[in-house]
């Protein structure tokens, strides 16, 4: 099987970017499978994702990188090159509710999520059995040991397993500002509301009190500003006056699992680029 | 054709309410076409809507009312009886954008909205031609005359035409607190965001800046608290990073028109009951 | 905790049904929690679901039944009375794909589905580990033993465990007409298309060829007429030209799991009534 | 204001297409605003849409065309170049229901649809007033004059006004095979069902009988095969057992208007390419 690569880049917008990138790929005999681009007129910035197959057996990421660096410098690009056959490594953090974890692990098990999951971290022991049945180590640092100990352990796991993305799959803890800073751009959270509505605690309770007719969930990158990070995906579900907070919570679980699963899949396929506080999603 | 009535009521919840109401209707030989109820466990309050056909030629709203008042008092009900064959009277207020107005007038014209519209009010002259083509008087009080003059004229129209509901169909003015108070429960607004997100001015601009993946519209009752009134209906549409504020505005127009049209239709059929700051919608 | 009951009924439509039923419940000191009704004008038939709490310690299903039978006969009702605290018993049948099974078992595990699942049946062994991890016996009758042997074993399981509902959760076998007949009204299937589009085999392949812009899933009761049984719930998801059959299949899995989960939950709460080839769903 | 162009093309897939096209545009000093491409692995065919701004005052469609023809021939492209500032010309055909017409005309009136509409054609006189209020000639050829006379008149209008697209906006006539053939790829219909469900007459009646839980509308290109042409857009709306055929029809009107409006807007912006019986939509 041929290797498949993704090149993502962003740079100040100007004439001829596509021509140079596409020309480079043609010279490398790379066959373009999919390509998207976006010119942000506000930021005067250009974004591109191109997925391609390698042209021959001697073709690898190191060679491509070496060849591309000149173009990248010329256009002042922020860029990355991924081999789609190399599996990114995820650390999933969870608390007592397992619907997002169960959903992600099932997708992983059936091959719908092409990642490695070296560990699941939690502040509770509830999800040990599910996780271990999937053959994944479960690391439990109880609340009693405190946030610094928990984050220290997560840091160690991230280092040990060379984690590419941390997923807060209903991990009901606020990370410390330092840890948020360290994880910038590589930590994703699912918030159980349609942001920016109902930030913070008890969003379904807030939604019930306000009497909204749709509830939602938001997958977003974590920043030090709680529930204010770049939004990746949102899902909504219709509700009505007869739904109790308990029922809203049940209905919302499906939106949470689906919004998070989509966000993780897009991330895995390198479809998410950051543009300041916003995301560019090349679906 | 037989008359068709709607009885709506709410009262403290207790045993036997349905039995008494249904018994009363059976005694009147009223044939129940549709009935819904809701027990709000938080408020310990019961809500009911029942739609029925009259039992005979001597049967009218006055007689029904007279007979029902005893039960209503016994259960401390807030209640209303409507003859669905009598058309409620709407005053529509609009500014320069006509998509909601055009949508409502078309529905009215083809008989999908069984109401009378004695007048359209505006602070601009832009929608005169559309309104008058539909045979409806257009009342224009320009911005230069000031808000008190505008509201005074609206009050006069409400009195003169015995208006049942005022619809702010993208009327880009904030009503004075006094006027809001006078209109409590009989004035509906369409806000061009998915409330409680993006209250106030420029919601599409706010949505663009925040980078949300869904935008929405909210039909709600007007209260003195801006964009905080009871929510009647919400609609959303998927958007992405490539959509400019202008494009969000265009996409949002459809959500606005549809959310408002549904809210008005439900109101016309007396499907909306108020429960504090929330609505009970018997669809 | 008080017992909670559901009474469902349908009968020829006429004056006074609600009054009699509600009067009966009031006499029993039953507190109505939720009630819906529907008059089908085409069939001139009345449908009702009423959920209520018992009035006292001596109050049970047997007594209620005995008391209600007179009214039921008078109105020629088809009716059933359920104690919501008694858990219905489900047999789930599955083949090689486990996304619907995994979804149902997780809901069951976290208490979102108040049922008992005495066994999972399959024509393949793939889902044994998942099922047994949940502590549920897994019965495997391979394809080589033939359909009669498989159905004989399912019949035995249904008898042994007093199964109330059989769920075909992507069980990729067509049941024999006899077995369909025996299971009438107590067997639910999830079909991976938006019926009546793309009946039969390979619906995602058909959808891809036709170039539809939305794909869907349909939960329906099984009848002898393949994919023609009464529809319970449908879900759709947007797709586009770039989606391969494989990608449609992946996207569709979420719709399948959600449509089936809703259908099962409604059935569990006795919200589904049959009206000829259609369903009445009192949500 | 600079001219803005769209180049659409499709050709057998091979190495270097994007490089050549982008290189060509860079040589022309064309600034790419938006670009999408799609490699259809089944057809081994490549599709591309690129939107760009001209590089200078001497730059026009004729020059671009002349320069591009060499590349186009080299890659065996089917291609078209449009100046987005030139407005395409639409003929709208309608019968007695005006919701789609009203919707399109309003969008056109407020500038959301950048087209010219030289005439509206109908087999009934009902929509004359609405059309003429918008300042558009209304051509009425009654049913009594027969289909050949109607189509002859439409042909004459198409010639006279150099019509680019015919829109059947609930034109309740089946066009003759000859006329369908003549209009291949330039005639769009809105069918009031979620195709391929419920082809032909009375789709809402069919939907009601089948008891579906979602109804839909489909905008598609017209071919000689009734309701089998390439699908452009589909919209759905949730319904339930309580909705009569009349109510389904009312609910469906919104889906029809929105699906058609989106399809027309995409066509106007040259976002729709044909790939056999399917469409490629570059949104």
Image (cartoon, coloured by chain):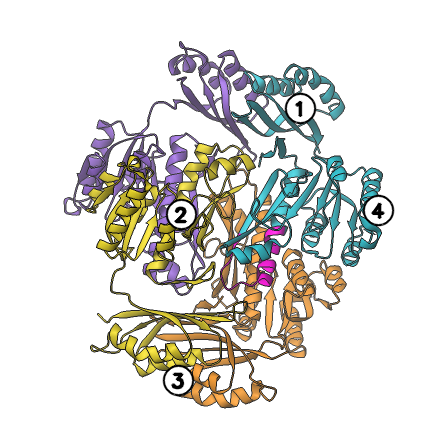
Chain colours: A yellow, B cyan, C purple, D orange
On residue B78, which mark appears?
A: 1
Mark whose residue sits in front, 3 or 4? 4
Quarter of the image for residue B224 reads top right
Q: Which residues are magenta?
A: B237-256
Classify C278 as above or below C163: below
Q: Which image quadrant: the C terminus of chain B?
A: top right
Residue D199 colored magenta?
Answer: no
On residue D75, which mark appears?
A: 3
Q: Position of residue C249 (x, y in %)?
A: 33, 55
Residue B252 colored magenta?
Answer: yes
For disc 2, the marked residue is A190
Question: What chain does badge 3 belong to?
Answer: D
- 3 and 4 marks on the same chain: no
> In the orientation shown, which residue stands out farthest toward the left?
C144
Element at badge 4? helix
Mark 2 near mark 1, Cβ–Cβ under 8 Å? no
Element at badge 2? strand
Q: Position of residue C191 (x, y in %)?
A: 35, 47
């Amino acid at each position: 099987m041929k290797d498949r690569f993704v090149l993502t880049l962003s740079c100040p917008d100007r004439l001829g970017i596509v021509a140079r990138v596409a020309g480079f790929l043609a010279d490398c005999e790379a066959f373009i499978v999919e390509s998207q681009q976006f010119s942000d007129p506000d930021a005067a910035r250009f974004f591109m994702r191109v997925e391609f197959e390698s042209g021959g057996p001697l073709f690898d990421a190191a060679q491509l990188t070496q060849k591309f660096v000149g173009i990248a410098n010329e256009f002042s690009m922020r860029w990355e090159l991924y081999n789609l056959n190399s599996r990114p490594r995820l650390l999933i953090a969870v608390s007592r509710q397992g619907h997002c974890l169960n959903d992600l692990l099932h997708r992983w098990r059936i091959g719908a999520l092409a990642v490695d999951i070296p560990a699941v971290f939690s502040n509770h022991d509830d999800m040990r059995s599910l996780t271990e049945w999937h053959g994944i180590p479960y690391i439990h640092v109880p609340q009693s040991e405190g946030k610094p100990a928990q984050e220290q352990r997560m840091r160690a796991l991230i280092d040990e397993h060379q984690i590419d993305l941390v997923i807060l799959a209903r991990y009901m803890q606020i990370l410390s500002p330092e840890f948020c800073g360290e994880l910038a751009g590589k930590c994703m959270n699912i918030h159980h509301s349609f942001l920016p509505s109902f930030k913070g605690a008890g969003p379904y309770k807030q939604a019930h009190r306000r009497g909204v007719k749709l509830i939602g969930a938001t997958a977003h990158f974590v920043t030090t500003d709680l529930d204010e990070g770049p939004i990746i995906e949102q899902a909504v579900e219709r509700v009505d006056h007869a739904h109790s907070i308990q029922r809203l919570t049940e209905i919302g679980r499906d939106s949470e699992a689906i919004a998070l699963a989509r966000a993780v899949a897009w991330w895995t396929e390198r479809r998410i680029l950051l543009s300041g506080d916003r995301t560019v999603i090349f679906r």
